[in-house]
Amino acid sequence: MFKKAKPYLIFVTSVLFLFVLSGCSEYAIFDPKGPNAATLKDLIMYSIYFMLFIMIAVYVLFTFVIVKYRDRKNFNEKDYDPSIHGSTKLEIIWTIIPVIIIIALSIPTVQALYDLTKPPAETAHKEPIVIHATSADWKWIFSYPEEGIETVNYVNVPEDHPILFKITSADSMSSFWVPQIGGQVYGMPGMVNDLYLQADETGVYDGMNSNFTGQGMSHQKFNFVALNEEEYQAWVKETQENAEELTEEAYEKLLLPDNVGEMTFSNTHLEFVDHGVDSGVYAMNVREKYGVEIKPHGSHGKDEESENAQEQEVQTDEESDSHQHSHQDH
């Protein structure tokens, strides 16, 4: 019977294998455009192949057992021993196997994590460009301290050049992620997490906050734009000469909870505040200054909850609201 079922079992597992891999091809993480993302893809594929091997082995063994030891007419009851207590040999085997599996998965995972903490080996001879990535409800702010440039909801980088992102947050804990370029790293007020990224090809890649931070989080996205070296240097020069200057008042209103469009400035907010040290005090003082109140979900009436089933409700005065919309139009 097992011999008859074997071709069907192979067919089913093959279809399942192809189904899994075809589904993987639809995700950005399986189309890496940088060494960081390529390392993560290799690690994920290694894990998938390893787990598929384990799954197939378990199903084959399971099928073998239920076929060989099934209840049948010619079954000899003398072969059944109700007093059996187990097999020391088998218990040792099925204890060692999980240990081997854990070791086989742990070694490449730890190695990959350590590799991702360093600049890409291919361009280790180049000095990394430092960019501060600061999240604020619900936008991304990118500061180039060496170039004296700040952008909102987009970041320009040269291709084939290491970028050191210093990730933090002005308020809520966020997660910085560009799936085709590298893995995600959390940003929190009062601390900085470093992340080396590099784009191997020019193009525009989707970036996002993958950590829930309130009703506007679904729109907290940014464009990761990889330019060739000449285009990048031209953009830096043009921005330094022509972009408007960021005032502290404009930056304060930028921190108010809202979604905005792309913006460009010829200086950075690091002149006013470093959120990697501030621990969120600056943002809370700004919200208090402009009359912004954050109410936790459940503090309003039932009708209001049904209209807005979110974790937070943001209330702003007319002045801050009109100012934010003027920035968005810009």
Image (cartoon, grey):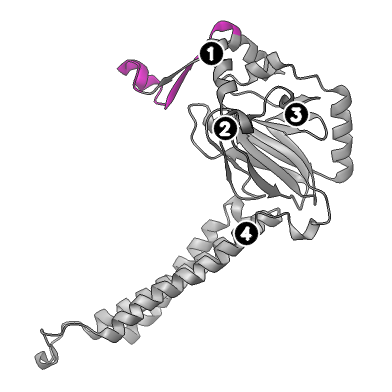
- The quadrant holding residue 84 is bottom left
How far separated are the C-alphas under marks 4 and 3? 30 Å
Three-letter residue code for mark 2? Pro
Name the residue beneath numbered marker 1: 288
Q: Earlier in the sequence, mark 4 or mark 2?
A: 4
Measured Cα–Cα span from mark 1 to mark 3: 25 Å
Q: What number is the disc on residue 114?
A: 4
Label 1: how many residues lie within 10 Å, few (<14), some (14-19) or many (20+)?
few
Mark earlier in primary sequence (3, 2): 3
Question: Do tag 4 and tag 1 residues touch (Cβ < 8 Å)?
Answer: no
Point out residue 247 in the picture as x, y percentages from the top left corner: 74, 16
Residue at the spot of label 2? 189
Instruction: Say whether disc 4 or disc 3 marks the residue closer to the N-terminus.
Output: 4
The alpha-carbon separation of the residues under discs 3 and 2 comes to 19 Å
Q: Which of marks 3 and 2 is in front?
A: 2
Q: How far apart are marks 4 and 2 (CA)?
A: 24 Å
